[in-house]
Amino acid sequence: MTTILVIEDEEPIRENIIELLESEDFQVLAADSGVQGLALAQTYLPDLILCDIMIPELDGYEVLQQLRQNSATATIPLIFLTALSDQRDTRRGMELGADDYLTKPCTPDGLLRAIASRLARKALFEQQTVTKLNELRTNINHSLPHELRTPLNTILGFTELLMADLEELALPEIREMMEQIHRSGLLLYQLIQNFLLYAELELIATQPEQITSLQNSCTEQTERYLEEIARQEAQKVGREGDLQLEIIPSSAQISVNHFKKLLTEIINNAFKFSASQTPVQVKSQREEQFLSITVSNYGRGLTVEQIQNIGGYMQFERKLYEQSGSGLGLAIAQRLVELYGGSFTVESIPEQITTLRILLPI
């Protein structure tokens, strides 16, 4: 049964609303103050809240603000039902995250239509969330075993060979096998770290207080990390001569660790999906209150469909490191930029040029 919490200090109005809702087969919780209403909301997690603004102890705005700051109650639809009709009051409620704003007197039909609309929207959101979680579960089940098995097979195969034939192997052969084992171990470690980080970022995205905490971070001297990581990634693949840098001194609203991870993924991607002796261009500049970073390469590029799937759950259906250009690394990069209040765009002409552009608040 759908539960609605009514926070209203005037008893006749509260009783009328309760009677109306119960006649429509809703389960009703009632409170006559902001403090009591907030406690009921946090205890019972109703499906929707009807709240007056001028109520004792905590007013409706304060109730809404505290609800939105708690991850357990942040997504509960709230409709203000109040005698305040000034446009500034409406705007304030909407800025705090109210889902609707009805002025008294309100007809029973008008109230029920508003409730039905908000509950339908909530049901749609929940269905979309379930669908995405099911897609994520399915796609991880398809890709993760394969991606884990590949480096594990190398590690197990070479260690078994070493254990069986160690006395017969020459030192150069042993060294080559150990290097293969080490590379596979690093690949496995990186893969696991990326999956864990992606899961962590998806969780943070549902917690407003965590996002606020993140956005208080700052990286100074962004140009230092840009140059350092760009040269490291170029050196890894022996393409120092392909790297073209055009960067400016700046700061950015992002933690140092997340900034370095973001740069590593987008620059690594540019080298990975372009051929040797073609340029990889890394540029930064200020655009009003944002730091703009662009990374361009002249490789295979991305299709419109692949660009649309970056950051979605469907990238798990592809091997993370095949030449599809839609691996988990870009999904992590996009999510990081979004969490810090920036923007992430990709423009690509297949077989010609691909440019990835991010904006981060300064």
Image (tube, rainbow, N blue to C red):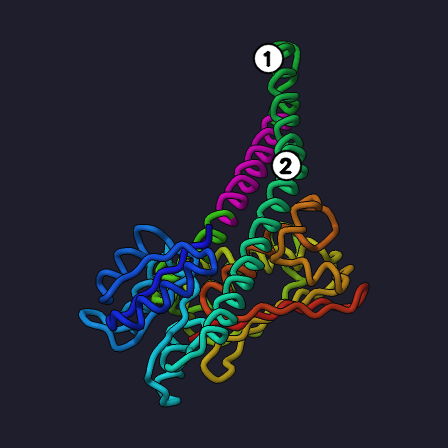
> Marks 2 and 1, how far apart in space?
32 Å
Inspect the magenta stretch and tell me whether residue 136 lies in it. no
Q: Which is more toward the observer, 190 or 127?
A: 127
Q: Quadrant of residue 52?
A: bottom left
The residue lying toward the viewer, choosing from 251 and 208, is 208
Q: Nearer the viewer, residue 10 or 100?
A: 10
Q: Nearer the viewer, mark 2 or mark 1?
A: 2
The x and y percentages for residue 26 are: 44, 57
Instruction: Give how far across and how far down residue 115 sits, in percent.
Output: 48, 67
Task: Residue type at mark 2: give it.
Answer: Asn
Counting residues from the start of the chain, the first of labels 2 and 1 encountered is: 2
Q: Is residue 19 left or right of residue 309?
A: left
Main SS, magenta region, reads helix
Image x and y of residue 240, in percent: 63, 59
How far from the left and from the top, in percent, is residue 268?
Answer: 61, 55
Q: Secondary structure at mark 1?
A: helix
Q: Nearer the viewer, residue 315 or 191?
A: 315
Binning the other alpha carbons within 10 Å of mark 2 as few (below 14), some (14 to 19) or many (20 upward) gives few
Q: Quadrant of residue 19?
A: bottom left
Marks 2 and 1 close (CB-CB < 8 Å): no
- Left or right: 229 as drawn, with respect to 155: left
Most distant residue in the left direction: 57
Which residue appears at 58% of the width and 59% of the height? 124
Judge whether residue 255 can be spotted in this image. Answer: no
Label disc, if present, on residue 141 of the rendered structure: 2
* Quarter of the rendering containing residue 319: top right
Q: Which residue is mark 1?
A: 163
**Amino acid type at image mark 1:** Met
* Kind of element beneath mark 2: helix
Residue that appears at 41% across and 59% down? 22
Q: Residue at x 61, y 9 (%)?
A: 167
The region drawn magenta spans 176-198
